[in-house]
Image (spheres, rainbow, N blue to C red):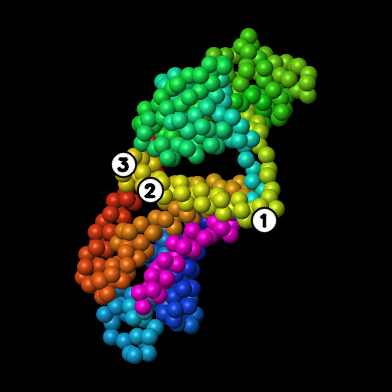
Amino acid sequence: MTTIMAGILMLGVLVFVHELGHFIVAKMCGVKVLKFSLGFGPRLISRQRGETEYQICAIPLGGYVQMLGEGSGEQGEEAELTEEEKTRSFAEQSVAKRLAIVSAGPIMNLMLPLLILPLSFMVGVQMPTYLEEPACLGYVVPESVAAQGGFQSGDCIISLNQQPVKSWNDTNKKFLGQAGESLKFLVDRHGERVQLTIPSDNDSLQGMQALGLLPQQEARIGGLAPDMPAASAGMKEGDLIVQIADFPITSWYDLKGTIQKIGPHPVDVKLVRDGEELTVELTPVQQNGEGSYLLGIAPLYSSELTRYSFGDAIREGAKKTWELIDLTVVFVQKLFTGNVSTKNIGGPITVVQIAGQAAQTDLSAILSVLAFISIQLGILNLLPIPILDGGHILFYLVELVIRRPVPIRTRELAQQVGMAMLLMLMLVAFYNDIVRLWG
């Protein structure tokens, strides 16, 4: 529940920033703002301040700014207004002002990362060290697409679709540009160069690990569950497991299979602690009496906290913002051309989950996730779909060309089509969310 509430709060921040953009520019243009709402549906909290009603509603999946002379209804475009009211009506503003007001929301979402990412870089970014190391494989998941493609532990990736790669991070970044295509890898295998191919139907958008490719990870303990065999046997964080019974352990990935072979039987585990070897005895157990046998340990991940000076943080923040915008735009392009499956679309449940999980970590992670979702929200709203900001922008651009407003009836019909498209998109997103949760 805490994760859900934290996720909703973070999503609320992004909606607030978006609607604040519309609100500020509308006020600057002299337009009367009737309502500023966070959420939809029944009102939970409502306060009148001046000419504007500020409210929080029950469904926290968006928001809106209602202006005089906007849309239909009693105070919409066709309402009878006094001359003074007309000067403050949205519909009576120039095309340039209307474009500025409508564009301000998405632009605020795209600009937010320029403010919060530098702060994240100054606070310090905790990154796994392997991401910037050469993409050498510590383990290939059996029966994964990578295993079927011929990958083996120890392979080091040199290039992807003839584009050189230097690290795990570099390889992951190049996946989006190759979405919908077969992946042709050149790897170094014990000094020999080998070409391997993974078919186009893959999960590369989710990174190398989704393909079944895992980094090198020694069997060093980073965490111990209380009242589990490892803790009860006296194991400590930092211990390196080198052998279980007669089975040598060369990486973390050797542990699960070995423990399942041992089953519920006492076994000697050989460790290295502070350069000295020692042996402990323990018996693997099943949690709640079912499932896999466990020792109650978690791996130690090597990570590095990197902090930047103010100037460097500004540069890195701008670079990361552009990178996220570019990746999101490419993803949308690939989605509409069919090169990316709709299975990759995430809905509100996924967004709340991601935001909530980040909120449970540190400030840097929170700011990074806020930036990522903010950019997606901004670009989504710029799509030329009637009912979204991008649809309104399209109408105003047409108005600039034909020198008269697009008829209200035409816009209403287009918005009905846009609403149907948006509902279908939301249904797909909710379906994907549910499949990820319970599939």
Residue position for label 1 = 311
170 shown above or below 328: above
- Which SS does the magenta portion mostly show? helix
Q: CA distance from mark 3 to mark 1?
A: 41 Å
Q: Residue at x 63, y 29 (%)?
A: 299
* Residue 95 within the magenta-colored segment of the rendering: yes
414 shown above or below 178: below
Point out the tag, 1 or 2, that comes first from the N-terminus: 1
Residue position for label 3 = 338
Point out the tag, 2 or 3, that comes first from the N-terminus: 2
On the question of residue 263 being in view, the answer is no
The kind of secondary structure element at disc 2 is: helix
Mark 2 neighbour density, 10 Å: few (under 14) some (14–19) many (20 or more) = some
Snapshot quadrant of residue 396? bottom left
Residue type marked 1:
Gly
195 shown above or below 54: above
Q: Quadrant of the C terminus?
A: top left
Q: CA distance from mark 2 to mark 3?
A: 10 Å
